[in-house]
Amino acid sequence: QICITGSSSRLLGKEIATALRGRTVTYELFPLSFSEFLTFKGVEYVPYSPRSESEVKHVFAEYVERGGFPEVVNYEEDLLFRTLKEYLDMIIYKDIVERYRVTNLFVIRYLMHYLIRNMANLVSPGKLFNDLKSQGLKISKNTVYNYISFMEEAFALFFIPVWTSSLRKEWRNPKKVYVIDHAVKKVLDTREDTRRVYENITFMHLRRRFARVTYFKGRQEVDFFIENASPPLLLNVCYDFSAHETKTREVRGLITTMETLKINKAFLLTADTTEEIKVGKKTLEVIPLWRWLLENQS
């Protein structure tokens, strides 16, 4: 048996399979999950223990702040920032520019920075192309699509489609963009945006388990829908669930979506609210994100 490990800057998974004539089984390795982050910090989660939960929540705040790259887990703030910046530069110049012989460095940097800043938002390559064109840049729409595909192949960014039975509708609708590690965003944008960080953490946790993750677009957009899970998995992320208006909107939107999809259970991931809401045969489990991450490992 031969195990081969290495940087994606040299060989992508599909390139390894080609080089070894298909006699391979490829495993994807992502930055640390929250469970792995706890292990790195030497913290064990004991359910229903107030002391343990308090410690775990403290470590989760660290995870939200510094991300899951193993090297930087215990770095001081200044070194953490400089290392994350180095990672971002290496992704752009080594994993993308060098590999694909990209010549328009300004555009590739602009696109990468724009997409990272818009983490967990809807993006459209067509609109990106029009934006670049309006700035006087001579670039084709195909080049924009190619650059985005390079970022995906390098595992720098992930783009999830809307859930639909029509491939044509899937391609027509914008996709939501997520980053390989949420902490990279702080290199480019120091504004607090915990809600989108929570959503990126949720996506990466789902991506570790499922190859295909989608979002749902109906009367109200729902962040994640995994049709191939058993049972199908529907989740929304709502950092602050305390306001009455927010609670009413989120519950109504998820219950309506559950009725549309004919499923009986959904999750609403929050900062610290725990609640079970029943509407007829529908159950909405409101749960803190840190707890959901630890209780949904398989």
Image (cartoon, helix red, strand yellow):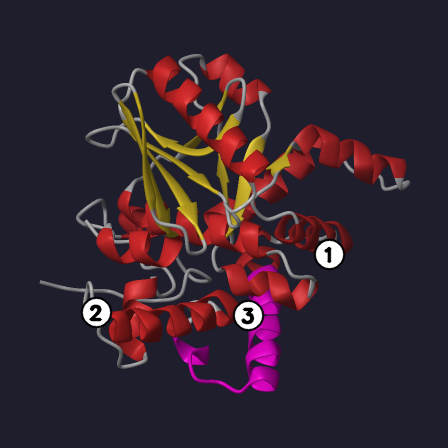
Question: Residue at label 2?
Answer: 49
Q: Is residue 77 magenta?
A: yes
Task: Describe the element under mark 3 as helix, strand or loop.
Answer: helix
Q: Are marks 1 and 3 in contact (CB under 8 Å)?
A: no
Question: Residue at label 1?
Answer: 105
For the record, the magenta segment spans 70-93
The reply, left or right, for residue 285 in relation to residue 192 is left
Q: How many marks?
A: 3
**The residue under label 2 is which amino acid type?**
Ser
Q: Is residue 161 above or below residue 67?
A: above
Which one is nearer the viewer's eye here, 25 or 230? 230
- In space, the residues marked 2 and 3 are separated at their CA atoms by 37 Å
Which one is nearer the viewer's eye here, 192 or 283? 283
The reply, left or right, for residue 66 in relation to residue 232 is right
Task: Residue at 55% x, 42% y: name it.
Answer: 177
Answer few, some or many: residues within 10 Å of disc 1's Cα (few below 14, many 20 plus, some between 14 and 19): few
In this rendering, the label closer to the viewer, 1 or 3: 3
| Residue 121 percent location from the top left of the image | 60, 40
Q: Is residue 215 above or below residue 119?
A: above
- Residue at the far right: name it: 136
**The residue under label 1 is which amino acid type?**
Leu
The reply, left or right, for residue 223 in relation to residue 42 is right
Question: Residue at label 3?
Answer: 87
